[in-house]
Image (cartoon, rainbow, N blue to C red):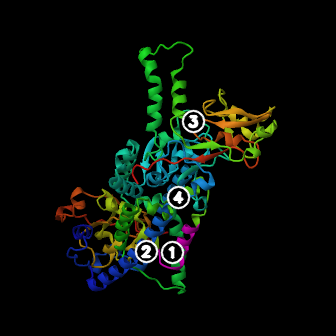
Amino acid sequence: MAPTNTKINRRQFLKASASAVVSLAVVGSAAYYFKDKSSLREKGFLRPPGARAEKDFLFACIKCGLCVQICPVRAIHLADWDDGLSYGTPFINPAVQACDFSCDAIQCAETCPTAAIDFQIFKHAGNEAVEPLYKKYPNGDFPRNLNPFKMQIAAMKRADKMGLAEVPHPDQCLAYHGQGYKGPLGHGNKGKLRPPGSTERIRIEETEVNRKICDLCVIYCPIGEEAIELTEVSDGKFLPKVKDGCVGCGVCQMVCPTTPQAIIVKPLDKEPLFA
Amino acid sequence: MSFLYDFITRDKKRKPLPPKDRSNLPFARLGFSFKEWHDGHVNKHKWRNRRWAFLIFINLLFIISFAFDLSILEGSLSGSRLIGIYLMDPFNSSQELVIGSRTGYIALLTTNFWIGFFVIMTFYWLLGGRAFCSWVCPYHFFAEMGERVHNYIVKKKKIREKTYDITVKYVFWAGFLLLAFLTKELVFENLNPVGILSRSLIYGPGLALIWVVALLLYEVFGIKRFWCRYVCPIGTTYSFIGDVSPVGVKFELDKCGYCTDCQDVCLVPHELWFVKKGAATKEVHFTGGDCTKCGLCIDICYGEALSFGFKAPSYILGSVEEKKELHPLEVPDKPKKEK
C-alpha cells in the first residue's frame, strides 16, 4: 500500500482521542449527577415486585423490557426522560394499572436476565411454604382440599414489598363519610384485574359495583384481610386500615373510585447491598 | 495495546504485491476496454435488498411479538429472548460485567444472562461480527439513508467532507467501560441509539428519540456516519470478534480491475484498502473487523472479485499464505457486455 504519513495519523488520532475523552468526561459526570435524581417517590411509581434497592437496581437493570412483555396485565412500562426515573428502567404506575399478581408466579422476576428483579426471594418463599406439605405427603397424594400450588403462589406474592398503601387524607375517602359507591370500578382509568377467588380477569372500567359502604380497596386486595381491613373509626365513619401484610401492589389505588384516590401506594426502598 | 493494533493491521503491514499489468486485468483478458466492461454491469442490488428485508423483518418480529403477545422474539435489542433462548447485547453485558466485578453483583447474574452473552458472541463470531450493524441494527438503517443524503449534499458542495481517525472508537469503547466502572451505572445505555430506537419501535416512541434524531441530523449535515464509525462501542465489540471470524468478504486480486467503485459504495471504506492498485499484499484478502458484511461492494463488483467467503484458520492467525493457495486465474463465464 502507499506509504502513509504516520506523523499526521498520530496527530489526528491524538486530537480525536482528546475530544473523545472530553466528551466522555462530560457524559460521565452528567450520568453521575443524574444517577440519584430519581423521583420515584414523588411520582408514586413502583418498581416491579422483587426489584432490588433503587441504587442496585439502576446498574443491575439492562433495560431490555422483557418484564414489560411478560406481564399479562401490561402493568410495567419503561421510563422515558420525563418519568423521573433512570431512562429505560421498568416501573409500575398503580394509579392506572397495578400489579394484581394474576401471572401467578411473579413472571417479571423470573424472566429478568440480570436478576435486577430478583426471583430468588419468591422462589424461596414458595418452596418454604410447600416444603412441610411434601414432607407430610412425600408421594404427592395430597388430600383433595389441599392444593400445594395455590399455597406456593400465596406465599410468593407475600414475599416482597414494593410499597405500602396509605390513606393520606381520610376526608377524601367515601367510607369516611359513610357513603357507598355505585358505578364502575376505578377513577376513569382503564385497567385489568383478577379479583380474589376468581379465575378470570375483568376490565375495571366495565365492572359495575354497588356497595352500601365503599370498601372496594378491601374486597379487591389480592392479599386479603392480613393486608387491609375496613374499620369503624367513629359512629358511621369507616376507614381502610392498612396492616403489616400489605405488599404495596397498588390494586387498592387502581380500583379506588375517588379522584384523587383516597388510598395511594407509596414505594418502599430497600437497603442497597452493592452500590 | 500495540500488539492488538499490530494484529488488526497484520495484512496491511506486509509488503505489497506488484500491481498487475494492463494485459492481465480481467477486462483485457476478455477483450473489452475498461469502459465497455464497466458499463456492461447491471447492479441488481441483490445483497442490499436481502439485507434491508432481513433488517426490517427482524425489527418487525420484535414489534409484533410485543403487540400480539407472541413468544417469538421478545425484549429489545438490549436483551431479548428468541423462542426461549436469551440473547444479550454484548456491550451492555460488558458494562454489566464490569460493574458486577466491582460490586460483587456478578455472582447474582442469572444463567440466562450468561447463556445470552455467549450465544450472541458465538453467533456473531460465526457470522462476522459487525454483521449485526448492517443486518439487524435499526439505527444503521436510518444512518445508511442519512449517509446517502450526506453524500448528495457533499456532491452539491454544500458541506465539506471531514474524516477522523477511526481508531478513536477504541478510546470510546474503553472510556464507556471505564465510566460504567466509575459511576456504577450503564452510562452508555442512556445514549445508545440502538437501544433507544429499538425500544421506541417496540414499546412506543418517547422523548429519548430526540437524541437519536439529533444524532442522525448531525450525521447528515456534519460528520458522515459519526456515531457508527467513531463512537458506537457495540460495533467496536463486534469488530473485535469480527476480525477473527471465519467469514468475511473475500477479495481475489486476479479478478479485480482496479476500478475502486467498491470503495466508493462501501460503508467502511478503510476495510477495502486492498482494492487500490498496488495496495494488495496477498492474492486473496478478507475484510477485517469493521466490515459490516453489507454486501454493497459485492453487488457493484463487475469482475466478481468480491464475494462472501470462508477464511482458513491460518488466514485468521495472520500467517503468510503459500503459493499453492493462490486462486487460479479465472475468467467470468459470460462477458458482461450484453444487458
Q: Residue furthest front?
A: A234
Q: Nearer the viewer, residue A170 or B216?
A: A170
- What kind of element bears circle 3? loop
- What kind of element bears circle 4? loop
**Identity of the amino acid at label 4?**
Ser
Q: Which residue is mark 2?
A: A23
Query: Residue A3 at x, y = what percent?
Result: 25, 83
Mark 2 near mark 1, Cβ–Cβ under 8 Å?
A: no
Residue A244 circle label: 3
The residue stretch that appears in magenta: B210-224
Residues at discs 2 and 1 both on one chain: no
For discs 4 and 2, the disc positioned in front in the rendered view: 4
Q: Nearer the viewer, residue B44 or B168?
A: B168
- What kind of element bears circle 2? helix
Task: Please give the name of the residue rendered at 55% of the width and 85% of the height, measured from the top-left corner.
Answer: B156
Residue A86 circle label: 4
Q: Which residue is mark 1?
A: B219
Q: CA distance from mark 1 to mark 4?
A: 27 Å
Task: Please give the name of the residue rendered at 46% of the width and 19% of the height, measured from the top-left corner.
Answer: A133
Please state, as top left, top right, bottom left or bottom right, where the N terminus of chain B lies in the image.
Answer: bottom left
Query: Residue B286 at x, y = what percent?
Result: 30, 65
Residue B42 circle label: none
- What kind of element bears circle 1? helix
Q: Chain of mark 4?
A: A
Q: Which picture quadrant has residue A185? A: top right
Does residue B35 sit above or below A38 in this rendering?
Answer: below
* Chief SS of the magenta region: helix
**Identity of the amino acid at label 2?**
Ser
Residue B40 visible, this angle: no
Query: Residue A261 at x, y = what percent?
Result: 72, 46
